[in-house]
Amino acid sequence: FDALNPAAAVNVTKVMLTWTLQMGFPYVTATLDNSVSGTTTITLEQNRFIVGDAKDDDKSQFDYQWHIPFSYVYKTKDEDVKTSDIHWLWYDDDNSKTITVADDIEWIKGNAGGNFYYLVNYEDA
């Protein structure tokens, strides 16, 4: 991965270690808060997706946190559908992130296009 670093906007090695040195994959919970008119706050939180024989007490050097490139499409109250930039959830910073969008958002679809390997869970604020 080191050979990709000079051409990339992020440290590819740092990102890929969280994906290649631990089992499984994450899910991101996205919560919308439209309580302030004209803006929407999106809260993202990552968790480990567990199914089958996986155990909550399995150990990982990254504590089952990943560097996640989160992107989404969203529909505003005035019917426009827009696409976001990539927002990174860095495992070593925090497992959650807050994004403020200067629009009243009706809905979002995380990981639009399925370009990344994580699930998205949606919750109401």
Image (cartoon, grey):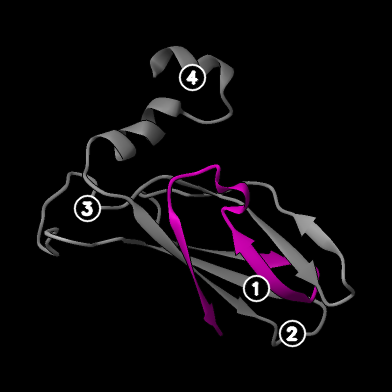
Using the numbered discs, state the Cα–Cα distance from disc 2 to disc 1 in whole angstroms: 9 Å
For disc 1, the marked residue is 41
Check the image and name the residue furthest to the front.
Answer: 52
The amino acid pointed to by label 2 is Val
Q: Is residue 102 left or right of residue 119?
A: right
Using the numbered discs, state the Cα–Cα distance from disc 2 to disc 4 in whole angstroms: 40 Å
Residue 37's x, y, as percent? 80, 84
Image quadrant where one finds the N terminus: top left
Query: Who's the residue at 79% across and 57% down the image?
Result: 82
Using the numbered discs, state the Cα–Cα distance from disc 4 to disc 1 in whole angstroms: 32 Å
For disc 3, the marked residue is 63
Q: Mark 2 or mark 4, which has the lower sequence index? A: 4
The circle on residue 50 is: none
Looking at the image, which is closer to me, 72 or 96?
72
For disc 2, the marked residue is 36
Confirm or deny contact between disc 2 and disc 4 (CB under 8 A): no
The circle on residue 5 is: 4
